Amino acid sequence: MNLPNSPIWDDGAWPGLPELERDLRTEVCVIGLGGSGLAAIHELLKLGRRVVGIDARSVAGGAAGRNGGFLLAGLAKFYHETVQQFGRGFARSVYQATLEQIERMIQETPEAIRRVGSLRIAASEEEEQDCLEHYRALRADGFAVECYEGPEGKGLLIPSDGVFNPLLRGRILARQALEKGAWLFEHTPALEISGQEVRTPKARIYCQQVIVAVDGRLERLFPEMVGRVRTARLQMLGTAPAPEVRFPRPVYTRWGYDYWQQLPDGRLALGGMRDAELEAEWTYADEPSETIQTRLENLLRSIGVRARVTHRWAASVAYTLDGLPVAEEVRPGVWAIGGYSGTGNVVGAICGRAVARAVSGKKPPDAALLGLFSLLE
């Protein structure tokens, strides 16, 4: 039997990490052991820094290990929208950075990732037209994209994208960080944060810099961000193996509000429908709701899946007004990373690495960081 609100990615094999119970001294404390926090930790270790990492839950226990497992190039908005909003130079630079980050992720954790491309499927004539604009913008800047028509519908095939098991990747990165000398602790919430000290329920961490990488509920930790970021609940479900359908690539449809992928063992992970109760989903609650789950199951049946639902779960993520992530020093010695607007798997890792270099007084050494480092200046 599966635990309530447990993602399909959790195989129950994680032995867990200890809770912090004694005071520690280190150079950098990283709060949040999701994708961006772990990327920051690895970059800090590479730079020779001493690191302590803590999480109020478990490794990738928040949105980092509870999402749909999509690896998509670019920011939260589609490429042509990013071009329109920020200009072609910025859009091209960031998109290239995310492509390079996906390659890096494959090298780091090949057992967790499948580069199978992704489908953006139009759910209306209006969206078909938008797909065409999306296609033209990517082609104009030399990025891989194909027009697509198949069993899933009409839209775009983006061959450079992929899928992964986000919880497995997080746990692999955590084990690697421990082997390299990081101190990592689960079930250790940060109660008070300053640039020199982090207080937890049973101990204090004395440090020189703090990186907060939590995404959802970011404005709760930093009230100064209220009005700039806002937390929402994203919901998903998972099924038993469904041999009656075959989805070789992940599907992103209805302007990205709905999405699913079929795992190698035939199970499906499907999410979305947030716009059905948009105001109600602006919430700190991260338990699945009956209304959205009913709509998700209806969507599941509409795409031909008869398999039983085995998992239902939710997660908190932060959205920003302009669609750009937060990656900056918000208080003296305290840096914040988050606000990925629902698509942080790739961008979050870039931001984590960039902030790790920034707190160490380093500039990005490669293009995969240069694209987003302008956000930190």
Image: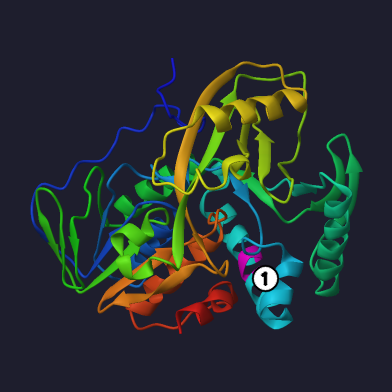
Task: Categorize mark 1 by other alpha carbons within 10 Å: few (<14), some (14-19), many (20+).
Answer: many
Q: Secondary structure at mark 1?
A: helix
Q: Residue at x 33, y 75 (%)?
A: 330
Q: Residue at x 48, y 79 (%)?
A: 364
Q: Is residue 148 magenta?
A: no
Q: Secondary structure of the magenta portion, mostly?
A: helix
Q: Return the residue nearer the eye: 356 or 152.
A: 152
For residue 268, say whether it is visible. Answer: no
Q: Which residue corresponds to mark 1?
A: 96
Question: Is residue 140 rendered to the left or right of residue 331?
Answer: right
Q: Position of residue 92 (x, y in %)?
A: 70, 75
Q: Position of residue 93 (x, y in %)?
A: 66, 77
Question: Is residue 19 rendered to the left or right of residue 37?
Answer: left
Which quarter of the rendering shows the N terminus?
top left
Q: Return the residue nearer the eye: 175 or 272.
A: 272
Q: Position of residue 255 (x, y in %)?
A: 73, 51
Q: Position of residue 131 (x, y in %)?
A: 83, 57
Amino acid identity at mark 1:
Gln
The image quarter containing residue 303 is top right
Q: Residue at x 29, y 36 (%)?
A: 16
For residue 311, say whether it is visible. Answer: yes
Highlighted range, magenta: 95-99
